Image (tube, coloured by chain):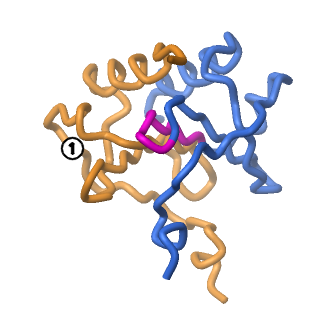
Chain colours: A blue, B orange
Protein backbone atom coordinates (compact mmCIF):
# COMPACT_ATOMS: atom_id res chain seq x y z
CA UNK A 1 0.00 0.00 0.00
CA UNK A 2 1.50 3.33 -1.01
CA UNK A 3 0.83 6.53 0.86
CA UNK A 4 -0.63 7.85 -2.33
CA UNK A 5 -3.17 5.04 -2.51
CA UNK A 6 -4.29 6.09 0.96
CA UNK A 7 -4.99 9.54 -0.38
CA UNK A 8 -1.90 11.09 1.18
CA UNK A 9 -0.39 13.56 -1.22
CA UNK A 10 3.27 14.21 -0.68
CA UNK A 11 3.78 17.10 -3.03
CA UNK A 12 1.87 19.85 -4.79
CA UNK A 13 -0.67 18.52 -7.28
CA UNK A 14 -0.70 21.51 -9.61
CA UNK A 15 2.11 22.22 -12.05
CA UNK A 16 0.29 24.76 -14.13
CA UNK A 17 -3.08 26.49 -13.91
CA UNK A 18 -5.81 27.10 -16.44
CA UNK A 19 -5.84 30.65 -17.71
CA UNK A 20 -9.08 30.54 -19.70
CA UNK A 21 -12.27 31.27 -17.74
CA UNK A 22 -13.88 27.82 -17.81
CA UNK A 23 -16.31 28.44 -14.96
CA UNK A 24 -19.34 27.21 -16.84
CA UNK A 25 -17.80 23.78 -17.40
CA UNK A 26 -17.09 23.15 -13.75
CA UNK A 27 -18.93 20.44 -11.85
CA UNK A 28 -16.86 20.33 -8.69
CA UNK A 29 -14.06 22.36 -7.12
CA UNK A 30 -11.54 21.17 -4.55
CA UNK A 31 -9.83 23.76 -2.39
CA UNK A 32 -6.72 22.29 -0.84
CA UNK A 33 -5.03 24.16 1.98
CA UNK A 34 -1.27 24.49 2.30
CA UNK A 35 0.44 21.62 4.11
CA UNK A 36 4.00 20.67 4.94
CA UNK A 37 4.08 18.87 1.58
CA UNK A 38 2.79 21.76 -0.50
CA UNK A 39 2.99 25.31 0.70
CA UNK A 40 0.48 26.73 -1.73
CA UNK A 41 -3.28 26.75 -1.71
CA UNK A 42 -4.35 24.56 -4.62
CA UNK A 43 -7.64 24.61 -6.46
CA UNK A 44 -8.59 21.68 -8.63
CA UNK A 45 -11.74 21.82 -10.71
CA UNK A 46 -13.44 18.77 -12.15
CA UNK A 47 -15.14 19.44 -15.47
CA UNK A 48 -18.63 18.33 -16.45
CA UNK A 49 -18.91 15.65 -19.12
CA UNK A 50 -15.21 14.77 -19.37
CA UNK A 51 -14.48 14.59 -15.64
CA UNK A 52 -11.12 16.14 -16.46
CA UNK A 53 -9.26 17.70 -13.54
CA UNK A 54 -7.87 21.16 -14.09
CA UNK A 55 -5.85 23.32 -11.72
CA UNK A 56 -7.01 26.88 -11.20
CA UNK A 57 -5.09 29.88 -9.95
CA UNK A 58 -6.49 30.99 -6.55
CA UNK A 59 -5.45 34.55 -7.31
CA UNK A 60 -7.17 34.84 -10.70
CA UNK A 61 -10.19 37.16 -10.47
CA UNK A 62 -12.36 34.84 -12.59
CA UNK A 63 -11.59 31.95 -10.23
CA UNK A 64 -12.61 34.02 -7.21
CA UNK A 65 -15.84 34.91 -9.02
CA UNK A 66 -16.60 31.26 -9.77
CA UNK A 67 -16.15 30.35 -6.10
CA UNK A 68 -18.27 33.28 -4.95
CA UNK A 69 -21.00 32.29 -7.37
CA UNK A 70 -21.02 28.70 -6.11
CA UNK A 71 -21.22 29.98 -2.53
CA UNK A 72 -24.10 32.35 -3.25
CA UNK A 73 -26.32 29.74 -4.91
CA UNK A 74 -29.55 29.38 -3.02
CA UNK A 75 -31.47 26.19 -2.55
CA UNK A 76 -34.28 25.80 -5.03
CA UNK B 1 -18.37 -1.95 -12.29
CA UNK B 2 -20.88 0.25 -10.55
CA UNK B 3 -21.48 3.85 -11.53
CA UNK B 4 -20.46 4.76 -8.01
CA UNK B 5 -17.08 3.09 -8.42
CA UNK B 6 -16.57 5.31 -11.45
CA UNK B 7 -17.08 8.34 -9.25
CA UNK B 8 -20.56 9.03 -10.53
CA UNK B 9 -22.76 10.09 -7.64
CA UNK B 10 -26.41 9.51 -8.20
CA UNK B 11 -27.83 11.32 -5.22
CA UNK B 12 -26.96 14.05 -2.76
CA UNK B 13 -23.99 13.15 -0.57
CA UNK B 14 -24.94 15.26 2.43
CA UNK B 15 -27.69 14.25 4.83
CA UNK B 16 -26.82 16.66 7.59
CA UNK B 17 -24.34 19.51 7.93
CA UNK B 18 -21.89 20.42 10.68
CA UNK B 19 -23.11 23.30 12.80
CA UNK B 20 -19.95 23.89 14.84
CA UNK B 21 -17.34 26.21 13.30
CA UNK B 22 -14.60 23.68 12.56
CA UNK B 23 -12.70 25.83 10.08
CA UNK B 24 -9.32 25.37 11.74
CA UNK B 25 -9.49 21.59 11.35
CA UNK B 26 -10.10 21.67 7.62
CA UNK B 27 -7.49 20.39 5.19
CA UNK B 28 -9.54 20.34 2.00
CA UNK B 29 -12.95 21.52 0.87
CA UNK B 30 -14.97 20.18 -2.04
CA UNK B 31 -17.62 22.42 -3.57
CA UNK B 32 -20.05 20.34 -5.58
CA UNK B 33 -22.43 22.10 -7.92
CA UNK B 34 -26.07 21.08 -8.33
CA UNK B 35 -26.70 18.35 -10.89
CA UNK B 36 -29.70 16.41 -12.09
CA UNK B 37 -28.95 13.93 -9.29
CA UNK B 38 -28.71 16.48 -6.49
CA UNK B 39 -30.25 19.87 -6.78
CA UNK B 40 -28.31 21.46 -3.96
CA UNK B 41 -24.83 22.86 -3.79
CA UNK B 42 -22.90 20.56 -1.47
CA UNK B 43 -19.77 21.36 0.49
CA UNK B 44 -17.71 18.53 1.90
CA UNK B 45 -14.73 19.30 4.11
CA UNK B 46 -11.96 16.82 4.81
CA UNK B 47 -10.46 17.21 8.27
CA UNK B 48 -6.76 17.27 9.10
CA UNK B 49 -5.40 14.28 11.02
CA UNK B 50 -8.50 12.09 10.88
CA UNK B 51 -9.29 12.58 7.20
CA UNK B 52 -12.95 12.53 8.21
CA UNK B 53 -15.38 13.99 5.68
CA UNK B 54 -17.92 16.44 7.01
CA UNK B 55 -20.71 18.23 5.16
CA UNK B 56 -20.94 21.98 5.60
CA UNK B 57 -23.89 24.28 5.07
CA UNK B 58 -23.16 26.63 2.12
CA UNK B 59 -25.40 29.25 3.70
CA UNK B 60 -23.75 29.30 7.14
CA UNK B 61 -21.80 32.54 7.64
CA UNK B 62 -18.82 30.72 9.21
CA UNK B 63 -18.60 28.44 6.18
CA UNK B 64 -18.54 31.42 3.81
CA UNK B 65 -15.78 32.95 5.94
CA UNK B 66 -13.70 29.76 5.79
CA UNK B 67 -13.98 29.69 1.99
CA UNK B 68 -13.13 33.39 1.72
CA UNK B 69 -10.12 32.89 3.94
CA UNK B 70 -8.85 30.01 1.82
CA UNK B 71 -9.30 32.13 -1.32
CA UNK B 72 -7.45 35.10 0.12
CA UNK B 73 -4.36 33.15 1.18
CA UNK B 74 -1.30 34.48 -0.55
CA UNK B 75 1.63 32.44 -1.71
CA UNK B 76 4.46 32.47 0.75
User: Is residue A32 shown in magenta?
Assistant: yes
Q: Residue at x 16, y 38 (%)?
A: B19
Is A23 situated left or right of B22 in this image?
right
* Image vertical order of residue B43 relative to residue B9, above or below: above
Q: Nearer the viewer, residue B58 or B24?
A: B24
Q: Residue at x 50, y 17 (%)?
A: B76
Is B75 situated left or right of A27 in this image?
left
Which residue corresponds to mark 1?
B18
Is B76 situated left or right of B52 in this image?
right
**What range of the chain is rendered magenta?**
A29-37
Q: Residue at x 47, y 25 (%)?
A: A71
| Extreme residue in the left direction | B20
Locate the N terminus of chain B by quadrant: bottom right
* Image vertical order of residue A54 relative to residue B71, above or below: below
Residue B27 locus on image (x, y percent): 37, 42
Q: Residue at x 66, y 21 (%)?
A: A63
Mark 1: secondary structure: loop
Q: Chain of mark 1?
A: B
* Image vertical order of residue A18 relative to residue B49, above or below: above
Quadrant in which residue B22 is drawn: top left
Residue A49 locus on image (x, y percent): 80, 54
| Extreme residue in the bottom direction | B1
User: Is residue B47 shown in magenta?
Assistant: no
Residue B39 locus on image (x, y percent): 52, 47
Amino acid sequence: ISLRSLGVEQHCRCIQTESKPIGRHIEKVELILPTSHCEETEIIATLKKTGEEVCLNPEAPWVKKVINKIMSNRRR
